[in-house]
Image (cartoon, rainbow, N blue to C red):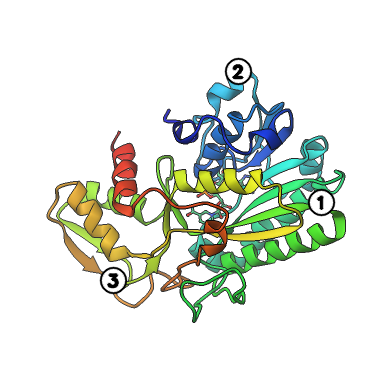
Amino acid sequence: MTNLAKQINDSPLMRSYIEGKRVAITGGCGFIGSHIVDLVALCNPEKIIVIDDLSAGTTLIFIEPYIESGLVEFHQKDIRDKVAMAQLLASTPVVFHLAAQPSVPFSVNNPYEDFMINVVGTQNILEALRVHENPLLVFAASGGTIYGEAEIIPTDEKYKLEPISNYGAAKAASEMYLSSYSSLYNFRTISLRLGNIYGPRSSHGVMYDFYHKLMKTPESLEILGDGQQKKSYLYIADVLNAVDLLVSKELNGFNAYNVASRRSTSVNEIADIIIDFLSLKSEKAFTGGNRGWKGDVIHAEGDIQKLVSLGWEAKTTISEGIKVYIASLQS
Ligand SMILES: NC(=O)c1ccc[n+]([C@@H]2O[C@H](COP(=O)([O-])OP(=O)(O)OC[C@H]3O[C@@H](n4cnc5c(N)ncnc54)[C@H](O)[C@@H]3O)[C@@H](O)[C@H]2O)c1
């Protein structure tokens, strides 16, 4: 199983902070969470507690070797279970919180369920951490949805939060609690306002959809909307570098960072890169309208200056990253 975290740097910067600690990773069986397990495993922690209810159809495949070696303790639990979260985190002062329902359309059709998982679930984690002196919570927010249809692009972290989907609203609401807990109870919180993250192990998103549609019908590709929707696509290895850098800084209080690419890419361009990589001659068929679905932001692009000023830069271009990702889907 490709270990990207190890390939980038097998001695992470955050090692001095993580070493010897018990660390929990919610959603640790999923795409981003399992890569974070790999990253934390390189830091010689005392133990990694993975909490995941496997509701996304995810499995133990990426964390199995760590379970066998005794480094990871796995708990199939739902983050909505407040009592279980309190028990599991009672002696675990560092949490990477990735578990969530990650779909905008689902949140539009199921607002209550989205709220319960994405807001109450996050609050349960915060509450569980309140027993600790100076806990650290690293949270996966969403730079692509919390600003809504921003008038200033690229959009920096000081811009108003005006989400146009329930998913974006839940991420924004969670951040507000990170802020209040940081102020009231001496928490250290880092909110990663992630762009559209892609790469090996991801089983959702536009690239995953295009690849599978093309495998089924190579002669044509259905594209939702007019294909002009533009997002900050960022390769997973660049996210791991950002997480490593931010945790190593040992920041106090509440900190929000856009974690995104320098330029946005249209869905149409992504289709072209994938069709070209697969050596196909597929006709593109657009469903019409200017967004993919209700609640879809037409143009989302995070201003990354705040993160860049700490010394971070995305290293993977969109075409390089897509090629590695599609090759991983092929194998
Ligand atoms: N992938 C992206 O482009 C992207 C962009 C912005 C933000 N995010 C956020 O990053 C995080 C990880 O996303 P991902 O792409 O790795 O998703 P993923 O679906 O691959 O992983 C999420 C994991 O959380 C688990 N989970 C879901 N609901 C749960 C619950 N109630 N209790 C316990 N576990 C639960 C799932 O089983 C899954 O293994 C999410 O919070 C998501 O909102 C992702």
Residue at 53%, 52% (x, y): give it. Answer: 311
Is residue 23 placed above or below 215 in the rendered structure? above
Q: Which of 258/72 is in front?
A: 258
Nearest to the eye among marks 1 and 3: give it: 1
Crowdedness near tag 3: few (<14), some (14–19) or many (≥20) residues, C-alpha within 10 Å:
some
Is residue 228 placed above or below 40 in the rendered structure? below
Residue 125: % across, % down:
75, 49
Callout 3: CB less than 8 Å from ligand 1: no
Residue 160: % across, % down:
61, 77
Crowdedness near tag 2: few (<14), some (14–19) or many (≥20) residues, C-alpha within 10 Å:
few
According to the image, label 1 marks what residue? 127
According to the image, label 2 marks what residue? 69
The answer to whether mark 1 and mark 3 are in CB contact below 8 A is no
Mark 2 and mark 1: Cα distance apart in space: 31 Å
Residue at 33%, 37% (x, y): give it. Answer: 328
- Point out the tag, 3 or 2, that comes first from the N-terminus: 2
Q: Amino acid at mark 2?
A: Ser
Q: Is residue 89 left or right of residue 65?
A: right
According to the image, label 3 marks what residue? 287
Residue 224: % across, % down:
32, 67
Q: Answer with the quarter of the image where residue 261 lies.
A: bottom left
Q: Which of 114/206 is in front?
A: 206
Q: Is residue 295 left or right of residue 285?
A: right
**Element under disc 2:** helix
**Element under disc 3:** loop
**Element under disc 1:** helix
Q: Amino acid at mark 1?
A: Glu
- Point out the tag, 1 or 3, that comes first from the N-terminus: 1
Q: Quadrant of the C terminus?
A: top left
